[in-house]
Image: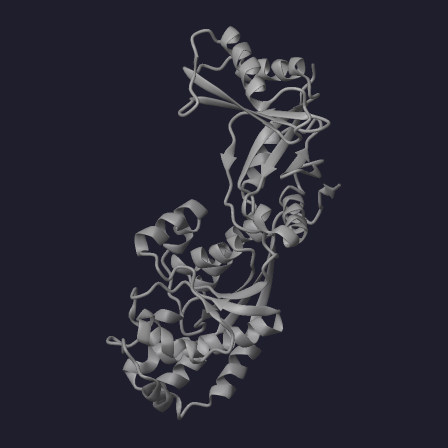
Amino acid sequence: MKLRPAVIVHYHEVGLKRGNRPLFLRHLARNLARATSDLGPVHLRQLSGRILLDLDDHPAPETVRDRALRVCGVASAAVAYCVPSTVDAMKAVVGRLVEGRTFASFRISARRAFKTYPMTSVELNRALGAFVLERAPGARVDLHNAELEIHVEVMPAETFVYVDRLAGPGGLPVGASGTVAALLSGGIDSPVAAWRMMKRGCRVVFVHFHSVPYLPATSQAKARALVERLTAWQYESRLLLVPFGEIQREIVLTVPPPARVVVYRRLMVRIAEALGRERGALALATGESLGQVASQTLENIARINEAATLPILRPLIGMDKLEITDEARRLGTFEISIEPDQDCCTLFTPRHPATRMSSEEVRAAEARLDIPGLVAQGCAGAVMEIFEFPARARAAVV
């Protein structure tokens, strides 16, 4: 019997959306199609509680599965084989899957998506388990810590059998929750924060502030590399490169040294907000973690918030540096972030920045600045670059 491969995708949080579930599923299907669009013929089908990527004669089903595992909203994915819903057909594919494998224990996890099937899940487990014991007499059944788990999902017209189910990122599909503008430095934190907003269903527009010509263009190169890496999770990204050196120079001439860092951040927020609004952003996102540096004390965060009219989302606010670093390693952004560079945060930075500024102190520090003019200057100098992943060709959505 020829085995028909497919990738079976399960979602979790999307399934809890009740009346809005079709909207989230459309976003999820669209993102799966885009993520696999350069891998040859992939046809999507929405089934009860799952999405199927049909791969008739596809040369690399594992590659399709790996792409699916990088789609936000996917709880798990596995290469499965489609057979008729008969016990003999199920046994045939189970036999193929266990052939050549060495395992001391196993379990059968059979589920019926429709309850009129003539055998119950328990009966299927017993019949298929007995079949495996005949093929692997040295193995034993272990329902709690099995070395090999064989999944059997019985649908009305077909059954899917698979092993090696892998966990996806979970969350919500990108695009389902609107757009945010993320302030992207060249450091470790902000790329992780941007990815966390993607995982909550947001499309992210990146805003990077640089100090060329006062500093080399290395921070821009890092920002491009980070956005390119993160675009694999949202398929199309916009990076706005904002010249900030002249603005910093203006601040240095009028603002006392201890107040400069907070004033810098407040102007970045205003500029990012203006650029984000033009592109439909409903919030800003930053990589701030409470207490990590001088600008991230609770008092200074409050002062920065006062400069914004959009919400500022801080997905890392309760995480420590080790937790953030571990997530950056998993995303593949860590090695890029630690490359040496000089960004605008190192230019004109005071040795002893204020850690607990009051609203009155901030107003006094900004009183001699032309805030609207500086915001307009930053926006006018912004240059946008577009990143795509993968090629524009799209998979068919059935």
- Left/right of residue 195 with respect to residue 280 in the rendered view: left
- Left/right of residue 226 with respect to residue 281 in the rendered view: left
Across and down, in percent, residue 85 comes to 69, 21
Across and down, in percent, residue 13 comes to 54, 48
Across and down, in percent, residue 395 comes to 71, 42
- Seen from this angle, which residue lies furthest bottom? 368
Closer to the camera, 35 or 244? 35
Q: Quadrant of the N terminus?
A: top right
Residue drawn at x 71%, y 45% as measured from the top left? 394
Q: Quadrant of the C terminus?
A: top right
- Left/right of residue 373 with respect to residue 50 in the rendered view: left
Q: Is residue 95 above or below residue 30?
A: above
Residue drawn at x 40%, y 49% as measured from the top left? 327
Its colouring scheme is one colour
Q: Is residue 177 above or below residue 389?
A: below
Residue drawn at x 43%, y 51% as measured from the top left? 333
Residue drawn at x 57%, y 18% as measured from the top left? 123
Location of residue 91 by image quarter: top right
Q: Is residue 289 above or below residue 336?
A: below
Location of residue 357 by image quarter: bottom left
Location of residue 213 by image quarter: bottom left
How many numbered circles does the render carry? 0
- Left/right of residue 260 with respect to residue 111 in the rendered view: left
Closer to the camera, 246 or 11? 11
Closer to the camera, 128 or 104? 128
Across and down, in percent, residue 354 comes to 27, 78
